[in-house]
Amino acid sequence: MAEKFNVKLEGKVALITGSSRGIGEAIAKEFSNEGASVIITYKKNKSLAEELNQKLKNSMIIQLDISNRQNIRNAIQNILKKHERIDILVNNAGINKPTDFEDVTDKDWDEILNTNLKGSFMISQEIFSIMKKQNYGRIINISSISGQYGGPRTVHYAVSKAGLITLGHCLARFGAPYNITCNNIAPGIISTEMTKDEIANVNSSEIFKKILLNRPGTTDELTGIAVFLASDDSSYITGQTINVDGGHLLRT
């Protein structure tokens, strides 16, 4: 790949949760291309994180379980030992277990909410004080359009993503005096490891009829927005939700 000029994230340190695959991996690659020092995180699969680390120019890997506050604190301290700052946080880590409403168990509910919402709250809270001292920060939440219309067979996931959007509004409000912005990206159906079964096992033509562009999106179609929101180009944008859904919501 040819060397880029006028990179948008030069000198920035970016922590991306759930960045060893899928949307998180794609964002990590693009942030690296734009000059950022990228913190690749993984919960269990270290080999995927190591594989990605070898492809990036200035990155480090760290084990991170965002459902455990002490684990979050330990990870942040390890990052600060090397970089002394964290400029960008992307709350991307998330899980889903499509289940009919009446079949969702308490265990399912707690697992989804603890990872997708509580985990993002805890890591944002721990990093917020760092960004306040820097008088600078960019927080990006990877939500979902299901959090805006109530996705079918994903009540716990939809609720967690709706909560994540509201968390973004709160962080935007609290962060504004300290030059900290927070915005949400709400993907529709994006081709990733998480969605491949949904796309393959259901009549894809029926799914795509709900999308104006009549196809799933790709991770490459989302990463440019993430770069924009992480960069100083978006310095006057905060508390917003950008839907990357091919027009899905307009047909819902």
Image: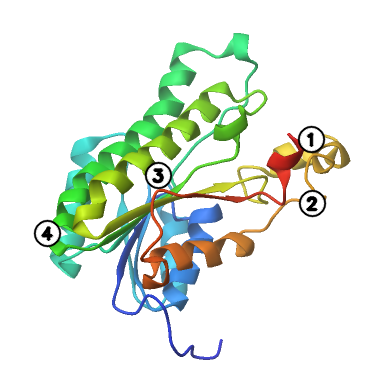
Q: Are marks 4 and 2 in contact (CB under 8 Å)?
A: no
Q: Looking at the image, which residue is at 44% across and 16% down?
A: 107
Q: Is residue 152 above or below residue 134?
A: above
Q: Position of residue 178 (x, y in %)?
A: 19, 57
Q: Residue at x 49, y 90 (%)?
A: 3
Residue type at mark 1: give it. Answer: Asn
First of labels 4, 2 by sequence position: 4
**Can residue 66 be seen by looking at this rendering?**
no
Label 4: which secondary element: helix
Q: Amino acid at mark 2?
A: Arg
For this rendering, which residue is in front, 126 or 2?
A: 126
The Cα atoms of the two marked residues, 4 and 1, are separated by 49 Å
Which tag, 2 or 1, sits closer to the chain's start? 1
The residue identified by callout 1 is: 201
Q: Position of residue 71 (x, y in %)?
A: 22, 41
Alpha-carbon span between mark 4 and mark 3: 32 Å
Kindly report which numbered mark, 2 or 3, lies closer to the viewer in this rendering. Answer: 2
Q: CA distance from mark 2 to mark 3?
A: 32 Å
Farthest residue in the top direction? 102
Q: Is residue 83 above or below residue 67?
A: below
Q: CA distance from mark 4 to mark 2?
A: 44 Å
Q: Earlier in the sequence, mark 4 or mark 3?
A: 3
- Which SS class for mark 2? loop
Badge number at residue 44: 3
Q: Which residue is mark 4?
A: 133
Q: Are marks 4 and 1 in contact (CB under 8 Å)?
A: no
The residue pinned by badge 2 equals 215
- Which image quadrant for residue 15? bottom left
